[in-house]
Amino acid sequence: MCYVKCISSLGWPEASLEGLFELAARYDVPRVELRSLGGTIDLRAYLEATYGTPAELVARGPSVAGRVVALNASLALAGATIAAREELIGLAPWADALGARWLRVFDGGRPGEVAAVAVAAAETVRWWREMRRERGWRVELMVETHDTLLSGAAITEFLAAVPGVGLLWDAHHTWRKGGEDPVATWRAVRAHVVHLHVKDSVAVPSARHPFTYVLPGDGGFPMDALMAAVRVEGFTGPVSLEWEKQWHPYLPPLETALRVAAVRTWW
């Protein structure tokens, strides 16, 4: 297997960093990405309350080497607010301390607005790169396909206008929201992908969406076909189960999803 399994802390919002690492290890998942810890998505506040400073985390915290691939921020590149920019600035030193390569940001905008979103996104990326140079941070940005980037064509157009940004491809979003075959999307965007989100759903409305998330393998997401394509291409980045229990309390615990995925060799 070439890619690396990963889980998002969204699946266990109340977890501590140590607890998340322990759960991942039980299911042979070597990487995690952080969006929530200790019942909050304010990662900076949680990390400061728990460890004090990034330096203290390195000195006294759990062994983090190679485990955390990303810290996930709320900022949208198009329409970035002052508060969202401040959140990103606050997360960067923690990302470096944790050894995370990426800060996840969103695209922003709405479907069909790719050109306008790209112009706004490019300005935010310029701002970020200036901050990064000034402060000597190592962590870089990756943009998640979330609001505007719902097809291979849209992603390709966006990245041509905003070069050098890593791509977090949410394969479920382009499939369920964009109506595109994940294998076709993968072939269109593969050269830019640094991280994948995967999950499963059925076409039954839920409280927040016109679909409902389900346990891996219980829905219609073509995981087998996608993973076959990913393996053929020799992708070596993280393939992350984004179990969104933070946003969808109807979901069973993350450990249940991991157990089912393991039994079914879903990934």
Image (tube, rainbow, N blue to C red):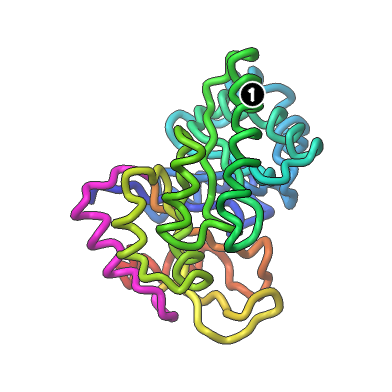
Q: Which residue reaches farthest left?
A: 232
Q: Is residue 49 above or below residue 168?
A: above
Q: Is residue 203 left or right of residue 153?
A: right
Q: Quadrant of residue 249?
A: bottom right
Q: Position of residue 193 (x, y in %)?
A: 39, 46
Q: Which residue reaches farthest front?
A: 115
The amino acid type, in three-letter code, at marker 1 is: Pro
Numbered disc 1: secondary structure: helix
Instruction: Residue 68: tell me if it is visible.
Output: no
Q: Position of residue 217 (x, y in %)?
A: 39, 76
Instruction: Residue 118: tell me if it is visible.
Output: yes
Name the one closer to the observer, 263 or 240: 240
Please say whether residue 40 is one of the residues in the magenta stretch.
no
Q: Residue at x 65, y 81 (%)?
A: 206
Residue annotated with mark 1: 93
Q: Is residue 186 above or below residue 128?
A: below
Quadrant location of the C terminus in the rendered image? bottom left
Q: Residue at x 72, y 29 (%)?
A: 90
Looking at the rendering, the stretch of residues picked out in magenta corresponds to: 217-237
Please say whether residue 235 is one of the residues in the magenta stretch.
yes
Q: Position of residue 225 (x, y in %)?
A: 27, 69
